[in-house]
Image (spheres, helix red, strand yellow):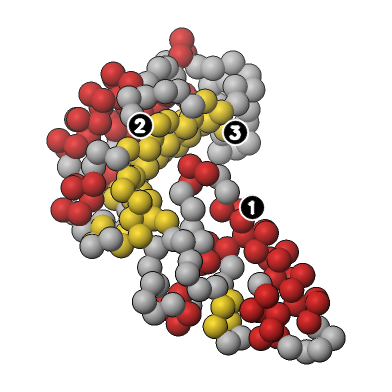
């Protein structure tokens, strides 16, 4: 749809960093590092990078310490060459993520060393477990800022219209705002039956 509305600007573009991410069973974390009940979200400082960690219920819904899961997401801008070498990014367009089995051993070794220098427990243990088991994904991040939202009777909303970085945690809210705005514009023009005018107002 972007290609139809804006043929000169259809693709979200690579934002210049990736997110390493994984979910780890808490039972794989040494007991001395496990967090207490209701730990919430953690955002420890790195060295020019960023980590988001959260403890969530286990696959069976359990929130008992030792039966939960640890999710982590490490924002990293140092592996852009690797992403291009492996075809994850072509030109300025993201093609695909990188699964654990496809990540070079040297890259994982370097990631492990960096984690040792940067992150506190229990996130370090979770990251190291993910690296050892290759149970992680590297996702190149793309962003899209629109120049055109409407053409004739077609309109873009949500991630199709504007794709923000996950760092902002704003994608869902922006999509709701789009839907509400579009509904308001359509409601104002519904009596006159001028859908194209309503879309242009949107």
Residue 163 left/right relative to 15: right
Q: Mark 1 highlights which residue?
A: 173
* 183, 21: nearer the viewer: 183
The local secondary structure at tag 2 comes to loop
Q: Residue placed at 71% from the left, 66% from the top?
A: 181
Closest to the observer, 24 or 113? 113
Secondary structure beneath disc 1? helix
* Upstream in sequence: badge 1 or badge 2: 2
Of callouts 3 and 2, the N-terminal one: 2
Q: Is 103 left, or right, of 163 in this rendering? A: left
The mark closer to the camera, 3 or 2, is 2
Q: Quadrant of the C terminus?
A: bottom right
Q: Quadrant of residue 109?
A: top left
Task: Tell me the distance, in whole angstroms, between the alpha carbons under discs 3 and 2.
Answer: 27 Å
Q: Position of residue 4 (x, y in %)?
A: 45, 82
Which residue does the numbered mark 2 point to in the structure image? 49
Residue topped by disc 3 = 57
Q: Quadrant of residue 38?
A: top right
Give coordinates of residue 89: x percent, y percent. 26, 57
**In the foreground, 150 or 96:** 150
Q: Residues within 10 Å of mark 2 (few under 14, many from 20)?
A: some
The image shows residue 133, relative to residue 192, as above or below, that is above
Query: What residue lies at 39% left-to-right and 63% top-to-bottom?
Result: 12
First in sequence, mark 1 or 3: give its number. Answer: 3
């Amino acid at each position: 749809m972007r290609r139809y509305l804006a043929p000169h600007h259809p693709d979200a573009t690579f934002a210049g960093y990736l997110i390493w991410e994984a979910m780890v069973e808490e039972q794989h974390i040494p007991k001395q590092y496990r967090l207490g009940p209701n730990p919430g979200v953690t955002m420890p400082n790195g060295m020019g990078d960023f980590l988001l960690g959260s403890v969530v219920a286990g696959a069976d819904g359990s929130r008992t310490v030792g039966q939960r899961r640890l999710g982590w997401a490490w924002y990293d801008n140092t592996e852009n060459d690797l992403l291009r070498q492996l075809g994850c990014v072509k030109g300025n367009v993201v093609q695909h993520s990188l699964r654990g089995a496809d990540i070079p051993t040297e890259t994982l070794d370097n990631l492990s060393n960096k984690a040792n220098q940067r992150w506190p427990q229990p996130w370090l243990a979770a990251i190291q477990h993910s690296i050892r088991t290759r149970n992680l994904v590297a996702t190149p991040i793309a962003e899209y800022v629109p120049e055109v939202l409407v053409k004739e009777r077609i309109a873009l909303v949500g991630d199709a219209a504007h794709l923000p970085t996950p760092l902002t945690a704003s994608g869902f809210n922006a999509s709701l705002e789009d839907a509400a705005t579009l509904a308001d514009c359509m409601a104002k023009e519904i009596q006159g039956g001028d859908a194209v005018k309503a879309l242009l107002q949107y």
